[in-house]
Image: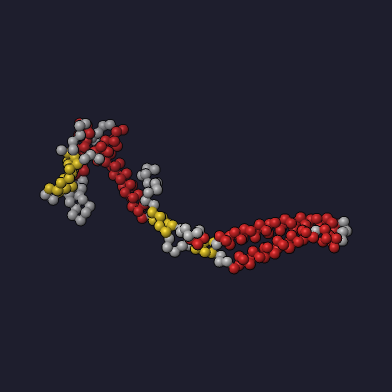
Amino acid sequence: MKHLINYSPGYEPEEIEEQPMVENPEVQELKQKRSNLKSELSQIKSKFGHEVLEEMEKDANWEEVKKKHILTIADIAGIRSQITLLGGKIDKLPQEIKFDEAHDGKKLVELNYEKKRFIDCIKTFTYHMEKKMCEILSNYYDKKKEIQPALAMIVRRGAYVKLEHGKLIVRLRRFKNSEIDYAARELCEDLNKMKPFTLDKFHLPISYELE
């Protein structure tokens, strides 16, 4: 929040060349069907066993019990057959396939954080730089609550840039507000005491001035 770096621009999605292996969706679907059948079978067997035990306690003949529950027994056999069939299908399929094959050609991407890290570093650096410049400016501008707007007015001010005798002159236009004008002039002086220079191969010294 302080550095304003929690934002989406800068995250660069890139397709992963070698798509990772994931569980085969078809296998997952078949396993789910098999699991449902096993659950159904368990319920039928539990109910069937309970009923058979009750009838056997009444000295019922086993053949009579079988005839009475012939449909239930057929259901149990049918479900077992389906479970076996599904198991065979699962064994024949690859357990894992590539991500894009599992998602109709849609490829998995990864985020390239290099650009984001670079932009975040700039934002963090800018935050600390502005904070330091506000500290300097507060020595020459009494309205503490207006320090940031005053600094913004100064650093965003139009300027003339000219190379003179091996020195880069940055000359700001004057301000109508005398307090801002004074503060900007003093800020330039303090910056010049730091002996700034360009960051290119020439390392030209920079001088900040007001008209």
Task: Please give left or right for residue 36 compared with residue 1 in the image.
Answer: right
**In the image: residue 79, left or right of residue 54:** left
**Along the horizontal axis of the image, is 28 left or right of 5?**
right
Q: Can residue 98 be seen from the camera position used here? A: yes
| Image height of 156 relative to 45, above or below | above
Quadrant holding the N terminus: top left
> What residue is drawn where x is 42% and y is 63%?
17
81 horizontally vs 62: left or right: left
Residue found at the far right of this picture: 59
Q: In the rendering, at what x and y percent does residue 165 appear?
A: 11, 49
Residue projecting furthest to the left: 165
| Residue closer to the observer: 142 or 60 | 60
Q: Which residue does the image show at 19% across and 53% down from the upper left?
A: 203
The quadrant in which residue 26 appears is bottom right
Q: In this view, does 137 lie above or below 44?
A: above
Along the line of sight, the residue nearer the viewer: 161 or 188: 161
Q: Can residue 99 be seen in this view?
A: no
The residue that appears at 33% across and 52% down in the rendered structure is 118
Q: Residue 49: image x %, image y %?
A: 78, 58
Q: How far across and down, in percent of the image, does residue 105 sit? A: 48, 60
Count of picture labels = 0
Q: Which residue lies furthest to the bottom in this view?
A: 92
Q: In which quarter of the image is the C terminus?
A: top left
Location of residue 81 in the rendering, given as x and y in whole percent from the top left corner: 70, 64
